[in-house]
Image (cartoon, grey):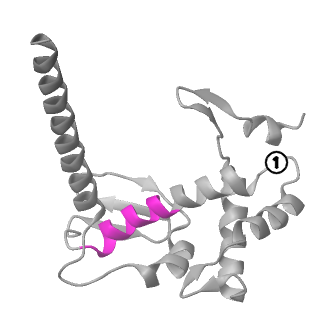
Amino acid sequence: MSSFSQSSVSSQSSRGSKRKWVPKEDVELVAYMVNLHNVGTFIANMRFKDGYLNELEKMLEKVLPHAMLKAKPNLESRNRTLKMYWAIVYDMLSGKKNSNFGCNEHRQLVVAEDVVHRSFPYYDQLTAIYAKDRATGKDTQTTADIIEEIDVEDVATTHTHEEKTISMDAKLMFL
C-alpha cells in the first residue's frame, strides 16, 4: 500500500466511519470543481446541477486512483465542508463584523488582531464558485447569526420536549 493511500484511509469515530482527507485530494477536488464551474456544463442558475458529483468522481479517479473517492458520501460531504469553511472565511473578510480580520494573500491566511491564523488555501477558488449565491445587504445573516438561531431553536425544541415529558409523567401519576 502506498504512503498516499495509507494516509487517506478512513478512521473510526463515534458517528461511524469518517474519511480523513489529505491536502493533495483537496487540491485536486477544488481544481476540478473550478474546472466544472468554468466550463459550465454542470451549472444552472449559478449552482452545480445534479450529476456533477458523479462527473467529479470520474475526473478524480484518473488523478487519484488509490483514493477511492465516491460521489456519495465522500465528494458530497467534502464539498459541504469546504463550502462551510469558505462561508466562515467569507463572512470574516466580507461580512458586517469584519473589522478585526484581514487576509494575508501571500500565505493564504486569515489574520486577526489577536494573532489568530488558520490556513484556507482554497478561498479564492471557492469564491469564484460560491460568492454569487451569497446574500448581501442589510438583512443578511452571518454564519454566527445562523448558528445562534439554530441554538435557540434547539433550546425551544428541548423545552417543548421536556414539557411534554413532564405532562406525560403527571398523567401517569394519576392512573
Majority secondary structure in the magenta region: helix
Residue at the spot 65% in from the left edge and 82% down from the top edge: 37
Residue kind at label 1, given as amino acid type: Met
Residue 168 in the image: above or below residue 156: above
Judging by the rendered image, the residue that carries numbered circle 1 is 68
Answer whether residue 88 is magenta in the image. Answer: yes
Residue 147 in the image: above or below residue 130: above
Residue 57, image x, y percentages = 79, 62
Q: Nearer the viewer, residue 121 or 62?
A: 62
In the displayed structure, does residue 90 sit left or right of residue 173?
right
Residue 68 in the image: above or below residue 141: above
Quadrant containing the C terminus in the rendered view: top left
Q: Nearer the viewer, residue 55 or 142?
A: 55
Residue at the spot 69% in from the left edge and 81% down from the top edge: 42
Residue at the spot 17% in from the left edge and 44% down from the top edge: 156
Crowding at dot 1, Cα within 10 Å, few <14 / some 14-19 / many 20+, comes out as: some
Residue 174, image x, y percentages = 9, 13
Residue at the spot 71% in from the left edge and 66% down from the top edge: 53
Q: Nearer the viewer, residue 38 or 16?
A: 16
In the displayed structure, does residue 105 sit left or right of residue 41?
left
Instruction: State which quadrant residue 75 falls in.
Output: bottom right
> From which residue to which does the magenta span run?
83-95
In the displayed structure, does residue 139 sit left or right of residue 85?
left
Numbered circles on residues, count: 1
Residue 144, image x, y percentages = 25, 58
Q: Nearer the viewer, residue 96 or 155?
A: 155
